Image: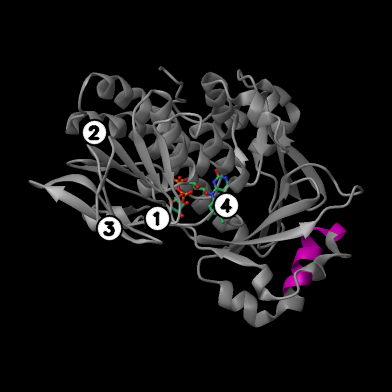
């Protein structure tokens, strides 16, 4: 086997890894991105491209090409308690070019980023290539051992960026410790077709002991049915018909199509995890995205945070790499920049999970609208604050090079 040699090896072709690869290649830095799957096609991944990510795309000069691809635009978010609808967030107030969340299946988004990357000769994407180990020299990581369809392959690099998601192999091989923040919920993802006569807004429906999120995806609804952690067996034991009845009770307009959920295979479990690494690096390796911090689905901000990590890493590392080699301190600077937004976002998510969602799921009666919701109804301009928290987040990153 002849080792491949590059400057940076990125493992994982998710939002963090692909954006990382694109930004390094765009700066003329040779980069190899490894993705273990043959394509990006995975169902029920984060399909949300947030206003701050769209801003980054504008700064990269690829926004118009991106928006020319089929997508949906979510301009407001709401909640329905019983029969009453409350508008919660209005992206129209944001100081960004795009005042909406673009909804695009993640595989289309990643295909788009791959196409953009391929415009640069220093971008090398290796599909069906799984990172299985680290190559070390004098205690520092100097590459990755991978398995390709043609057999084992070493990729040697000045350093490695692990963007291989929340089940990161490289993080485990590196022996990095993960701090669990706790998650009292799991999510059942399902899809139901959408009719013209349906309400248009993406919203969360709350009722006694139930929380059901509906995201308008044009010709279908992407739905999340929230359950207490580990309660899937209980839900299944009650039977599929009982589950259909629950959905219809929460959203009566699904009566005519709830049987599209023909078997439990049509309902996918997301085991929610919220965790982070106290330390994102070892000598010669840095973790970013879900590999550094798995996010709760609350707010749907996981993709956005993963991309923000990549932008911060490019901002810090590109000038260094243009002039020489990155040091351990340079890799650590990425965590220094992104640790605060990660902690703040997870803190807010854990608070909402524990205080709001858990109490709704435990409640025997229809929840009262909290004072905050009533306030947002009364003063529409206040809807800018939840919109900012979800659409932009803490410490947004901008392309510097
Ligand atoms: C069901 C579900 C729904 C979600 N909904 C939302 C949402 O609505 N909005 C939102 O913002 N976020 C959502 N998220 C979270 C979001 O998908 C993640 O936060 C985001 O994708 C993280 O990006 P990443 O690039 O860090 O990791 P991932 O997207 O996990 O990408 C990691 C990539 O690495 C590859 N890989 C893994 N191991 C290896 C290896 N050893 N070698 C090579 N390649 C490897 C994987 O195949 C994958 O392509 C959801 C997550 C799930 C599971």
Q: Which residue is mark 4?
A: 45
The answer to whether mark 4 and mark 2 are in CB contact below 8 A is: no
- Give residue 107's position: percent from left, percent from top: 59, 48
| Front in this rendered view, residue 349 or 11 | 11
Q: Which residue is mark 1?
A: 129
Q: Which residue is mark 2?
A: 332
Locate residue 139 relative to residue 379 in the image: left or right: left
Q: CA distance from mark 4 to mark 3?
A: 23 Å
Query: Which segment is the magenta one?
Result: 243-253
Which comes sooner in the sequence, label 3 or label 2? 3
- Give residue 33's position: percent from left, percent from top: 39, 43
In this rendering, the answer to whether 45 lies above or below 259 is: above
Which comes sooner in the sequence, label 2 or label 1? 1
The kind of secondary structure the magenta stretch mainly shows is: helix
| Front in this rendered view, residue 374 or 130 | 130
Q: CA distance from mark 2 to mark 1?
A: 27 Å
Secondary structure under the numbered disc 2 in the rendered image: helix
Task: State the residue at coordinates (75%, 46%).
Answer: 216
Which comes sooner in the sequence, label 4 or label 1? 4
Q: CA distance from mark 1 to mark 3?
A: 18 Å
Q: CA distance from mark 4 to mark 2?
A: 29 Å
Q: Nearer the viewer, mark 1 or mark 3?
A: 1
On whether residue 197 falls in the magenta region, the answer is no
Locate residue 79 relative to residue 332 in the image: left or right: right
Q: Which residue is mark 3?
A: 172
Task: State the residue at coordinates (60%, 36%).
Answer: 49
């Amino acid at each position: 086997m002849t080792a491949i040699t590059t400057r940076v090896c990125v493992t994982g072709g998710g939002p963090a890894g692909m954006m990382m690869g694109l930004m390094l290649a765009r700066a003329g830095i040779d980069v190899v991105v490894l993705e273990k799957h043959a394509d990006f096609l995975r169902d029920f991944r984060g399909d949300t491209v947030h206003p701050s990510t769209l801003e980054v795309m504008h700064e990269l000069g690829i926004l118009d090409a991106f928006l020319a691809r089929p997508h949906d635009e979510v301009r407001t978010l709401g909640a329905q308690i019983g029969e009453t609808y409350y508008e919660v967030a209005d992206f129209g107030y944001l100081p960004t070019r795009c005042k909406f969340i673009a909804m695009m299946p993640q595989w289309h988004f990643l295909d788009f980023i791959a196409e953009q990357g391929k415009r640069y000769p220093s971008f090398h994407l290796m599909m069906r290539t799984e990172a299985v180990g680290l190559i070390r020299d004098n205690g520092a990581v100097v590459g990755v051992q991978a398995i390709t369809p043609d057999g084992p392959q070493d990729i040697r690099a000045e350093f490695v960026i692990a963007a291989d998601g929340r089940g990161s192999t490289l993080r485990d091989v590196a022996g990095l410790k993960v701090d669990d923040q706790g998650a009292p919920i799991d999510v059942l993802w399902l899809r139901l077709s959408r009719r013209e006569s349906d309400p248009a807004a993406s919203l969360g429906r709350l009722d006694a002991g139930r929380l059901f999120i509906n995201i308008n995806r044009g010709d279908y609804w992407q739905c999340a049915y929230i359950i207490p952690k580990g309660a899937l067996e209980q839900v299944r034991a009650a039977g599929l018909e009982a589950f259909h009845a629950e959905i219809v009770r929460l959203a009566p307009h699904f009566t005519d199509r709830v049987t599209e959920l023909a078997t439990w295979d049509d309902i996918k479990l997301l085991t929610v995890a919220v965790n982070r690494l106290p330390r994102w690096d070892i000598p010669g390796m840095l973790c970013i995205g879900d590999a550094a911090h798995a996010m709760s689905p609350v707010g749907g901000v996981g993709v956005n945070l993963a991309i923000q990590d990549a932008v911060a890493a490019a901002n810090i590392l590109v000038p260094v790499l243009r002039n020489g080699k990155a040091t351990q301190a340079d890799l650590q600077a990425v965590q220094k920049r992104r640790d605060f937004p990660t902690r703040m976002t997870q803190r807010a998510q854990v608070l909402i999970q524990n205080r709001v969602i858990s109490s709704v799921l435990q409640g025997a009666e229809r929840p009262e609208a909290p004072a905050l919701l009533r306030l947002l109804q009364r003063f529409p301009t206040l809807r800018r604050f939840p919109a900012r928290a979800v659409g932009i987040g803490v410490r947004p990153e901008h392309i510097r090079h």
